Amino acid sequence: MQLLDGVLVSGHIKEQIKQEAIDWQAAGGKKPHLAAILVGNNPASEAYVGSKVKHCDELGFDSTLLRLPSETTEAALIAEVQRLNEDPAVDGILVQLPLPEHISPDSVINAIDPGKDVDGFHPISQGRMVLGQPTFLPATPYGIMLMLEYYKINTSGMHCVVIGRSNIVGTPMSVLMSRASNPGNATVTLCHSRTRNLKDFTLNADIIIAAIGKPRYVTADMVKPGAIVIDVGINRIEDASRKSGSRLVGDVDFDNVAPLCSYITPVPKGVGLMTICGLMKNTLQAAKQKGI
Ligand code: GUN
């Protein structure tokens, strides 16, 4: 079993991004600038947005974090998005999800200028992705593709089972893995909450991508020996042995599944770090698209 090491791979990719941004600026290009909007104070979202801003600093990008109260109206949030759309200093815009119940994420995402949609969530970005046209790829699936590429894992002809059909991870992941590219060229099965006999599918998988949001849901009896397992889950569970009283686990029962696998991502220090790489690559691309 080989661990797919998010620390190692994201370290390499961040060095590449940093150098590319330096070269771009030396050639007269603009310093990339990411603007993030956080509505309310969901602790997990606070942590994710904080990490995104920190990485901008680390890579020499500018960043703006706009914090709005949870009672912000949809119209007020869309007005802020439109203001950032118009701001020539801003290259990339992300609105951290989930949003409070009274705000439609679709309406907000649709308001983002597709040229600044570094999360790749806008219908235009997703449509281009499905058609295989150049676009911003959603950060987590993009990061997973970068990780498979780094380890030179040839997924051509593999049976890839994606568990979870979210717009953010499962659905775009299924598209990217089935595309005529490497990584890609896989035969993809997209499983979800209504799938009957999930195990019948996972036991036939050469690669499992788990994005369900349920702690340790994928157990050893569901995994074929030699399979590749990519764990997208970040779930906080109680753990009395920890000072904090809790710890993070993935959607995969790592301790029991790992010995079966050819490759597996850990949680933490796996896919989460790759998501940041995807976002930062998109932000640099957004700045470069403006030209010199
Ligand atoms: N919430 C969970 N993942 C993401 C992400 O990749 N982008 C945004 N904006 N919100 C998220």
Image (spheres, grey):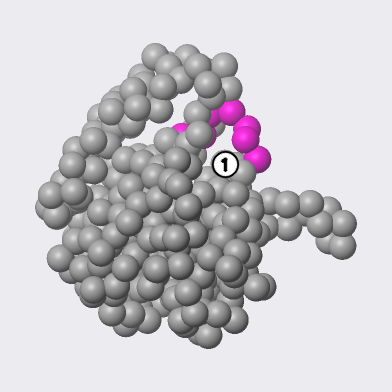
Q: How many marks?
A: 1
- The structure residue drawn at horizontal position 18% and vertical position 48%, both measured from the top left corner, is 130
Can the viewer see residue 24 in this picture?
yes
Question: CB of residue at label 1: within 8 Å of ligand 1?
Answer: yes
Residue 106 coordinates in the image, percent (x, y):
35, 27
- The structure residue drawn at horizontal position 20% and vertical position 50%, both measured from the top left corner, is 129
Q: Is residue 248 left or right of residue 93?
A: right
- The structure residue drawn at horizontal position 59% and vertical position 28%, both measured from the top left corner, is 40
Residue 227 vs residue 196, the one in the foreground? 196
Residue 62 vs residue 116, the one in the foreground? 116
Please check the rendered image and state whether residue 76 is part of the magenta-colored stretch, yes or no.
no
Report the magenta residues as a range: 34-43
Q: Quadrant of residue 145?
A: bottom left
Establish if 185 lies above or below 112. Answer: below
Residue 128 vs residue 190, the one in the foreground? 190
Q: Quadrant of residue 100?
A: top right
Which amino acid does the dot numbered 1 rest on? Ser
Q: Which residue lies under the disc numbered 1?
A: 45
Q: Is residue 169 left or right of residue 272?
A: left
Q: Is residue 252 left or right of residue 271?
A: right
Give the position of the C terminus as an image quadrant: bottom left
Instruction: Find numbered disc 1 in the image and state the secondary structure of the residue it sits on.
Output: helix
Residue 153 coordinates in the image, percent (x, y):
33, 80
Work out which residue is located at the far bottom of the displayed protein and give it: 1
Q: Main secondary structure of the magenta part?
A: strand
